[in-house]
Amino acid sequence: MQTWVWILIGIAAAIVLLAIVWSLVRKRRRTKQLKQGFGPEYDRVAADAPTKREAESELRARQERREQFDIRELPPNRRDHYNARWTDVQANFVDEPDKAIARADSLIQEVMRERGYPVDDFDTRAAYLSVDHPDVVDKYRAAHGIRVAQERGKATTEDMRRAVQHYRALFDVLVGARTNERVRS
């Protein structure tokens, strides 16, 4: 073969190699962004999905669907209204913990609805919350799990106390008490 043919083959091979490397770097960057953006939710979805690719596809789809919603902050008077209602939930916990946990869950849904989140079912709520509030969505899942156990008569008062604490962490973020702040355990 002539030298120019070898040069063309070398150039083509280099282009293919660069495309592969670029694709891998881009994929790692997307993975890193998803892990940073979703925090522990990334690991939860990855553990439940058949493949890492499907998990990441699900998370990207959540982000895209979330962009369709008009999520808005609550005005100060509505924050005050919801904070007063939350105070009632906590005050009633001592006498009626089972009703307090139901009220907390209901109040979370009401705040979400007013902010512009879809509230069709728990999985939908949790999925969209994971986009904006990945640090508290695991607390929301835990609180919901305790509420389901409580409805079946399998939750202790201590379990319900933890559920109210978990709901409170999400409530604070949703009403704006901790706007743009990551909630710690």
Image: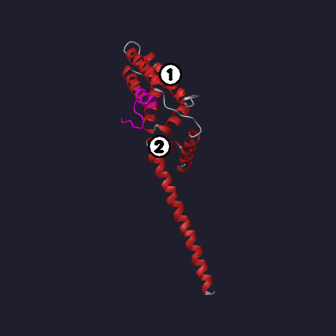
Q: Is residue 50 visible?
A: no
Q: Quadrant of the N terminus?
A: bottom right
x and y percentages locating residue 58 in the rendered image: 56, 44
Nearest the camera: 76 or 113?
76
Q: Residues within 10 Å of mark 1 (few under 14, many from 20)?
A: few
176 vs 1, left or right, is: left
Nearest the camera: 79 or 12?
79
x and y percentages locating residue 42 in the rendered image: 48, 44
Q: Residues within 10 Å of mark 2 (few under 14, many from 20)?
A: many
Q: From this view, report whether residue 76 is shown above or below residue 22.
A: above
The chosen color scheme is secondary structure
Q: Residue at x 55, y 42 (%)?
A: 63
State the SS at label 2: helix
Q: From this view, report whether residue 6 is shown above or below residue 17.
A: below
- Residue type at tag 2: Phe
Q: CA distance from mark 1 to mark 2?
A: 25 Å
Upstream in sequence: badge 1 or badge 2: 2
Q: From this view, report whether residue 76 is shown above or below residue 98.
A: below
Outermost residue toward the bottom?
A: 2
On whether residue 114 falls in the magenta region, the answer is no
The mark found on residue 106 in the picture is 1
Please report the bounds of the magenta region as a residue range.
167-185
Nearest the camera: 130 or 141?
130
x and y percentages locating residue 158 in the rendered image: 36, 22
Quadrant position of residue 14: bottom right
Q: Are marks 1 and 2 in contact (CB under 8 Å)?
A: no
Circle 2 residue:
38
Q: Quadrant of the C terminus?
A: top left
